[in-house]
Image (cartoon, rainbow, N blue to C red):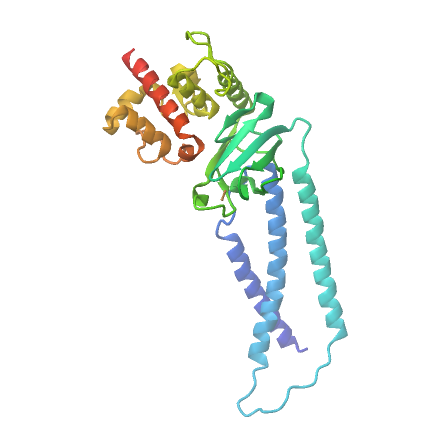
Amino acid sequence: MRKGSIAALLGLALIAGGVATAVALVPTWLPEDASQQAGRIAFTFWFVIAICIFIFAIVAAVLVYAVLKFRVREDDFEDGPPVHGHTGLEITWTIIPFILVTSIAIVSAIVLSRNDAQAKDTLRIDVKAQQFSFTFSYPDAKNVTSPVLMLPKGRSVELYMRSLDVIHSVFVPEFSVKEDIVPGLVTQLHVTPTRLGTFPLECTELCGLGHSLMRSQAVVMEPAAFDSWLHKQEKGAAPAPPSSTTSTSTTTTSSTTPISPAQAGLMVFNQNGCSACHTLSAANATGKVGPDLDNLVSYARTAKQPLESFVHHSIVDPDAYIQPGYSKGVMPTNFGQVLTKEQLDHLVTFLVQSAQKSGNK
Ligand code: CUA
């Protein structure tokens, strides 16, 4: 091969490699990492991409060079020269890909086993998926349930996932981990969150008409804040304080003494993690993320809506009206599906009653 040809090939390879590298690096393809697993997966991803760019540069250079250099001339009707392979080349293009593919397999195997390795104090969370919502429960804390995945930062967490109907899949892009939830199986997903914040959690398996609405959130909190949230939920799941005349039991099914709609609403409030984000004195809730529910009366006035329908609307379609000072897209939008109609009615009754009480103070 002449020196000129080698220089031309090399130049083409550099151009192709440069363009591919720019496409890979300039747009932000991946979200910012928020878990230990995400960092390792990103490493694997870039390791594979680097190999791909290398191969692409060689193939593109040879292709473009061959098209330009060996173009048939207008009056040339001859057959091409009879070439019968090239042992040296064939050995090279077998050994190099073999090494590359094997190295990808080794890196992936190491990352997979590290990502699945649970720590000693792994927190167990049960996940229930159904068309079209997720419910998360904490078996070590009296099975407290929440429609939002609450997680302590820095702790290894294992999700045990069941589906009540069809195949779903759980994915938090910032965590980089994803797992299907298959009816009849308990699938597992391990994650160690490393960054505080609220991240979208979505279903990534087409599961029916409401698939695109099957979304929730993963909220990563400081471990102390998480513990206090969990304790508060545990208390909420326990019998209501004996301030009322009727004694209540934890489960609505086995209670012989009927509880009032407002009391049932308090249970719905506690079991669905509302207090993590809202302040409400009637529920001893002190969350600061969302609007202060003791002020619902004045909020409804600002929104120019009757109190009861305002509360109902704000639960089912939280982004329709945003109280000034708070942001859109923070409150989960799936309560309309997670709660039964009865639970929703009870919750609205409870919120309206307690808001009127605190409004009159
Ligand atoms: Cu569940 Cu898509």
Q: Position of residue 58 (x, y in %)?
A: 62, 66
Q: What residue is shown at x 49% (from left), y 16% (from top)?
A: 255
In screen coordinates, is 119 left or right of 320? right
How many badges with numbers are in the image? 0
Q: Position of residue 347 (x, y in %)?
A: 38, 23
Q: Viewer-proximal residue, 266 or 110? A: 266
Image quadrant where one finds the C terminus: top left
Residue 165 seen: yes
Q: What residue is shown at x 73% (from left), y 77% (from top)?
A: 85
Q: Position of residue 123 (x, y in %)?
A: 62, 28
Image quadrant where one finds the N terminus: bottom right
In screen coordinates, is 258 left or right of 115? left
Residue 151 seen: no
In screen coordinates, is 232 left or right of 46? left
In this view, 27 is above or below 248: below
Q: Viewer-proximal residue, 197 or 161? A: 161
In screen coordinates, is 118 left or right of 20? right
